[in-house]
Each structure stands twice: as structure tokens, then as C-alpha cells.
Amino acid sequence: MRDHEPAPNRPGRRLTTKETAELLGVKPETVYAYVSRGLLSSKREPGGRASTFEAREVEDLGRRNRRESAGIPGSGGDLSVRTRITLIEADRYYYRGVDATELAARHSYEEVAEWLWTGRLVPGTAFIAPEATVRVARWAVEALPEHTSPIDRLRVATIAAAAEDPLRFDLSEEAVLNTARVLIPTLVDALPPVAHDPGDDAPLAHRLWSRLTARPADEDAVRVLDAALVLLADHDLAASTLAVRVAASARAHAYATVSAGLGVLEGPLHGASSGLAHRMLLDVLELGNAGPVIADELRAGRRVPGLGHRLYTGEDPRAQVLFGLLERLPRAEPALLAARDIVATTARHTPLHANVDLALAVFTSSFGMPATAGETIFAVARTAGWIAHALEEYGERPLRMRPVGHYVGPRPPQPLPEAD
């Protein structure tokens, strides 16, 4: 380290504008440009007029700038986000340090949602939305065309709930938690029931069941649904969660952050994947053999849905838990056998383990649910994680989720284009 360089890692050390500029190798004017772009945060000491900067943050920005100037691919948008919510490690995943599969075995979705948000487990936690909020959301959803997708319905319900809440711009922790406890049951209750509605005061999994299938609610089957909600509540920085954190970084209110997540979730490579697995599973059940179905997928150049996960070398732990619960349900046996046939048949070409989408497909196809049911379960479940990440992001520096674009277009100045 040069003599004039500050010691950036010393606890509590703050740098002057001159020291910051020297450390970054830029002019003081550029330092303030970094502040306006959200790349640095500044603070004025009591009684002082000059801005100071956190040493560690300056060092991180300098490291990023050096990576970009060295031309390291992807360095401009290579975001690393500190989080206390979910850890994925050694083919397991943990919510605030607790094995998520163990939480799914012992606690309800509502209880685990509170754990993600507050770090407290409160037995018997229940989410019930105000009648006025549910009524507005239902009106909005009922006005949609019959063929509307579940995600579109959930998006509209989210917007309607936001419009009903004049205090939605309050981003204090308690206000956001109150929003979450209202929004999640509103999303469920706004969906049109296809079976007997158990009422707004029934457990959330029972109310969701009546929106997914006309078959009577069997306690063991509803337990699988509740476990699925817990297992899908969060999964670190998945694409939809990153979108939520970007929105929260811009200080969008909680409803808007959830809406951002829902927009990304509809992609066929994210929340909609279970629907593809569901349809494939029905084809295998109809033919009685996975071979022709897998052959068609491979011939078309498509990846086989429901298999493999970039974060797990073995079987997805979420799938392990759901398969274990489904094995206790006689109704699920045919779909379970078909799923095993899919895994074994595909292994002749590429050895891949089942992921949570295939487990969801077994569940939804076994109980007369539509192919979109897995997407609905995923969206309702992940709302808890999105709120947890939004809360965490509200505590960070605003607009920090701002990668630097690497421009590869024609260099200016270019002549004005001629009109066609």
C-alpha cells in the first residue's frame, strides 16, 4: 500500500472526498458522480460541511472498477448481495440457518413466513385479510377474461390490493410486515374457487386447495400442499427475487416489488416450469411408457422438464421431501411411478436428478389440478421470500442494484439517421 493510501479496512474508518478520489484514481467530480448514480453513499459529519465515505464501500467500488477495466466478462453486472435469508450449500438449503426441509416437516407456511421476515417462530400464526381488501381484489380478478392465467390474476389482485391501501408507501418494517400479512391471504382469496370455499378464516393451505381442484380436501394431501408452500418460500437470488430486490432498491412499495417478482416468475424457465413437467407427466401416464415422450423432447432439442438443477449436484432437497410425502398417498402412486420412469429413461442419455418441478407435477396431476396449478403454488409461496428480500433491501443504500452497462454499439459521433 502506498504511503498516501488510507487503510480502507479499519473498522469505522471514513474517507474524505480527496482520499476517496485518490484511492479510486479519479477526480473529485467523478466521486460525486458515483454518488448520484447510487454507486457510493456519502455522509456529512455533524458540524462539518464536507462529505465523507465509508472506506470498505470505496474499496469495493475500486475493486469493481479494476475488474471492469481489465475486461473481465460479466464484471459490470456481477452482483453479490449480502443476505441473511437463505443459504444454499452442499445440496441443502437453510432459512436463517435452519434446514428448510425440517421447517417444512414441523411448521405451517404462515409460521415459516414469519420466520423469514422476523426471525421468530410463532405457533398458530394465521394470515387473514380485511374483507374490504379481498372484496376489491375479487372484483378486479372477476373482471378478467375466463382464459386469464393464474399469474395474471395474482398480478391484478396485487395491484387492486395496493390501490386499496393508501399507506402503501410507508416502507417502515412494521408497515411492510402488515402489508405482507394482508397481501398473501388476499392473493389466495381473490382466486376463483373451484370447490367448496372453506372460508376466509380457514388455514391458508385449505383455502388455496379449494382454488386448485374440485376434489374434496384430504388432510394428508393438504399437508403436502402446505409443505410445498414452505419449501418454495425462498431460494436465494432466483431471477424473480433479484427483480424484487431491484424494485426495492428503487424504494418501490411492497406491492410493487411483489408485482415485479410475479412478472419474472411467468417465464417458462422459472415458475412456469412445473406446468411443462405436468403436461409431460400426463403424456407418460397416457402412454404407459416414458420412452416415446422423452424421445420427442430430445428430438425437438428441448431440455426434459423437471430434471436437473444448477445449484444441486444430487436430487433437489425440495423434491426429496415432496416425494417422501407423496409416497404416503395412494392416489399419487401412478404419477410417482411415471416420474421414476422419466428419471430412469432420461438417465440413459444424461443422468439428471428430479427437481421440485417434477415433484409438483406429481402432486398437481394426482389430484385433478390444472397444469398451471404448480405455477400458482410457486407464486403464492415465493411471495413470502420476496417480502423478506424487500425488507432486507430497504435497509441497504438506495439504488445500489445498478450494474454498469458495457456499451458495444457504434462510437459517437454518428450522423443523424435519414428518415425512411
Image (spheres, helix red, strand yellow):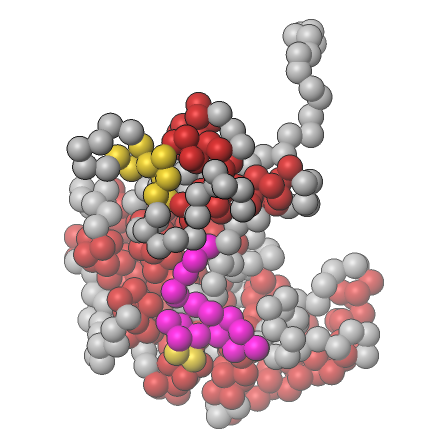
390 vs 79, left or right, is: left
At a point 67% along the width and 84% down the height, the residue shown is 340
- Measured from the top left, where is residue 348 in percent x and y? 81, 79
The answer to whether residue 93 is magenta is yes
- Measured from the top left, where is residue 153 in percent x and y? 39, 52
Using the image, determine if residue 21 lies above or below residue 2. Answer: above
At a point 61% along the width and 73% down the height, the residue shown is 312
The answer to whether residue 415 is magenta is no
Q: Quadrant of residue 381?
A: bottom left
Give the magenta-colored segment's residue range: 81-97
- Measured from the top left, where is residue 326 in percent x and y? 50, 86
- Measured from the top left, where is residue 14 in percent x and y? 34, 43
At a point 79% along the width and 59% down the height, the residue shown is 300
Please identify the quadrant where the C terminus is shown.
Answer: top right
In terms of depth relative to the viewer, which is nearer, 352 or 79? Answer: 79
415 vs 357, left or right, is: right
In terms of depth relative to the viewer, which is nearer, 216 or 69? Answer: 69
Using the image, determine if residue 254 lies above or below residue 336. Answer: above
Q: Is residue 301 visible?
A: yes
Q: Is residue 366 visible?
A: no
206 vs 412, left or right, is: left
At a point 38% along the width and 31% down the height, the residue shown is 17
